[in-house]
Image (cartoon, rainbow, N blue to C red):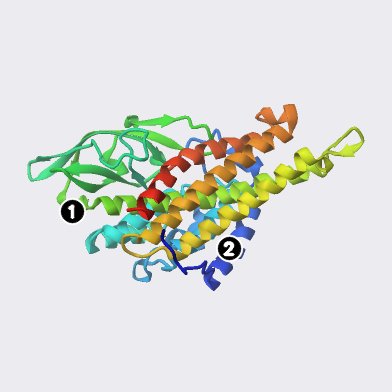
C-alpha cells in the first residue's frame, strides 16, 4: 500500500479568489438564468464572459509574461466550484484545459500566439474522443503528409463548447505517435459542427468533422501518453470541482424544501426517512470537496506524479457519486413535482448524470487508482 504525509494546502490566494468568485457568481447566475440560456445556441452569456475576462480569470493559469496571473489550476478550482454552485454556464473548463495544453506542452512560438489571446477572452477547447469511451488511450484520427505539410481528415465526438471555440486542440496520430493539432475555428466549415443534445442541457457539445484541413508543421505539438493522461485528469479534477458546487446548491434546495413543506401538519424534514439521507448528502459532499482541494494542492507543472494522479482519480470518483446521490434524492424528496422540468431538482440530476460520465465514470477512475497503487 502507498502512504503519504501530503495534506490539503488551502492557500491565501485560493481563499481570496473563492470569496470573490462566490460574490460574482451569486450576482450573475442562478437556476433561472441557467434555464434561460438553454435555448441559446452557444449556451452562455457573452457579457458574463467579458466580465470574467476583465477579472483576469481567463488567464489565471497563464504566466505573467503572456498577460496572465500565473496562479495555476489550484486557484481555478474555487472559481469552477462557485460556478457549479450557481449553475453558471460558461466554456470555462474548456478554456482552462486548452490553456494547460499550451502552457505545459507547446513551444514558445505557439505560446506567444495563443496565451495572450486567451487572456483577452478568446476561447479554446480540446477534442479528445474518437469514440465515447474516456478510457480509450489511442486516437484513430490520422494526420497524413501532403505538399510539405499535413492534412487532417476525420471526426471528433462530443467536443465541449466546440462551436464557441476560437481554437480546437485536436488529439491525433502522426506516424504512430500522439500529437495535438492546433486548428483554428476559421479552418472548419460551420456545417461541419453537429450539435449534440446532452442530458444536461445547460452544457454544449458537438461532433466535429475535419475534412481535408491543411495543417502546418508549426501547428503540431508532440505529446506522450502521459501528457494526454495529465490533461484528461485535469479535466476530471475541474469537473469534480464543478460537481462539488452543484452538490452544494442541490443540498441547499433540499434543505429549503424540507424546512418549508408540511405534510400531515408537520414539516417533512422532521421525518427520519428524509432527514437521514440529507445528512448522508452532506457527508458525501464534504468528502468530495476535501478530495478535490487535496488534489488541487498536489498539481505540478509537468506530468503528474503518482500521488497527484491518485488524488485526481479519487476526487472525480467521489464527486460524481456524491452528486448523483444528491440529485436522485432531490427528485425523490420533491415528490411528483420533482419529476417535472419545472422543478430545479431536474436540473441537478441532469447535471449529475452528465458529470458522472465526463472524463470517465467512478469505475474508470477507481480502476486507475488500483493500477497506480499496486503497480
> What is the number of the mark on residue 18?
2
The picture quadrant where one finds residue 119 is bottom left
Residue 261 relative to residue 59: left or right: right
Q: Which residue is depicted at the point 49% across and 64% down? A: 75
User: Quadrant of the image for the N terminus?
Assistant: bottom left
Residue 56 visible (yes or no): no
Q: Residue furthest bottom?
A: 12
Q: Secondary structure at mark 1?
A: helix
| Along the viewing direction, whichever of 293 and 77 lies nearer the viewer | 293
Q: Residues within 10 Å of mark 2 (few under 14, many from 20)?
A: many
Q: Nearer the viewer, mark 2 or mark 1?
A: 2
The picture quadrant where one finds residue 112 is bottom left
- Residue 289 to residue 360: above or below: below
Q: Secondary structure at mark 2?
A: helix
Q: Which residue is depicted at the point 13% across and 43% down? A: 175
- Residue 42 to residue 309: above or below: above
| Along the viewing direction, whichever of 131 and 164 lies nearer the viewer | 131
Q: Position of residue 291 (x, y in %)?
A: 52, 57
Distance between the alpha carbons at the discs numbered 2 and 1:
38 Å
Q: Which residue is depicted at the point 33% across and 29% down? A: 191
| Along the viewing direction, whichever of 135 and 221 lies nearer the viewer | 135
Which residue position is annotated with label 1? Answer: 218
Q: Position of residue 157 (x, y in %)?
A: 35, 34
> What is the number of the mark on residue 138?
none
Q: Position of residue 73 (x, y in %)?
A: 44, 61
Q: Which residue is depicted at the point 23% across and 36% down? A: 141
Amino acid at each position: 500500500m502507498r502512504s503519504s504525509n501530503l495534506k490539503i494546502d488551502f492557500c491565501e490566494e485560493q481563499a481570496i479568489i473563492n470569496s470573490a468568485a462566490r460574490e460574482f457568481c451569486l450576482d450573475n447566475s442562478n437556476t433561472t438564468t441557467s434555464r434561460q440560456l438553454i435555448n441559446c445556441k452557444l449556451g452562455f452569456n457573452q457579457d458574463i464572459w467579458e466580465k470574467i475576462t476583465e477579472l483576469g480569470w481567463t488567464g489565471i493559469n497563464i504566466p505573467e509574461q503572456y498577460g496572465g496571473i500565473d496562479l495555476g489550476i489550484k486557484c481555478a478550482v474555487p472559481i469552477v466550484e462557485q460556478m457549479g454552485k450557481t449553475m453558471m454556464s460558461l466554456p470555462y473548463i474548456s478554456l482552462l484545459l486548452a490553456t494547460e495544453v499550451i502552457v505545459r506542452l507547446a513551444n514558445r512560438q505557439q505560446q506567444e500566439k495563443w496565451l495572450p489571446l486567451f487572456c483577452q477572452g478568446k476561447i479554446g477547447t480540446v477534442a479528445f474522443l474518437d469514440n465515447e469511451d474516456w478510457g480509450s488511450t489511442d486516437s484513430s484520427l490520422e494526420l497524413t503528409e501532403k505538399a510539405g505539410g499535413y492534412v487532417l481528415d476525420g471526426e471528433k465526438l462530443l467536443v465541449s463548447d466546440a462551436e464557441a471555440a476560437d481554437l480546437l486542440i485536436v488529439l491525433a496520430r502522426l506516424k504512430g505517435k500522439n500529437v495535438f493539432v492546433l486548428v483554428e475555428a476559421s479552418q472548419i466549415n460551420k456545417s461541419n459542427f453537429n450539435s449534440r443534445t446532452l442530458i444536461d442541457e445547460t452544457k454544449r457539445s458537438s461532433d466535429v468533422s475535419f475534412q481535408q484541413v491543411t495543417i502546418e508543421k508549426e501547428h503540431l505539438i508532440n505529446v506522450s501518453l502521459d501528457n494526454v493522461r495529465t490533461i484528461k485528469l485535469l479535466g476530471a479534477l475541474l469537473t469534480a470541482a464543478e460537481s462539488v458546487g452543484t452538490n452544494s446548491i442541490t443540498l441547499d434546495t433540499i434543505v429549503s424544501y424540507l424546512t418549508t413543506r408540511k405534510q400531515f401538519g408537520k414539516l417533512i424534514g422532521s421525518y427520519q426517512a428524509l432527514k437521514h439521507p440529507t445528512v448522508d448528502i452532506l457527508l458525501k459532499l464534504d468528502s468530495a470537496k476535501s478530495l478535490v482541494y487535496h488534489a488541487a494542492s498536489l498539481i505540478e507543472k509537468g506530468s503528474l506524479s503518482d500521488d497527484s494522479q491518485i488524488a485526481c482519480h479519487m476526487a472525480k470518483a467521489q464527486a460524481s457519486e456524491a452528486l448523483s446521490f444528491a440529485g436522485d434524492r432531490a427528485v425523490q424528496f420533491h415528490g411528483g413535482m420533482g419529476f417535472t422540468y419545472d422543478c430545479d431538482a431536474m436540473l441537478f440530476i441532469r447535471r449529475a448524470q452528465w458529470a458522472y460520465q465526463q472524463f470517465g465514470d467512478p469505475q474508470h477512475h477507481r480502476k486507475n487508482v488500483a493500477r497506480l497503487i499496486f503497480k
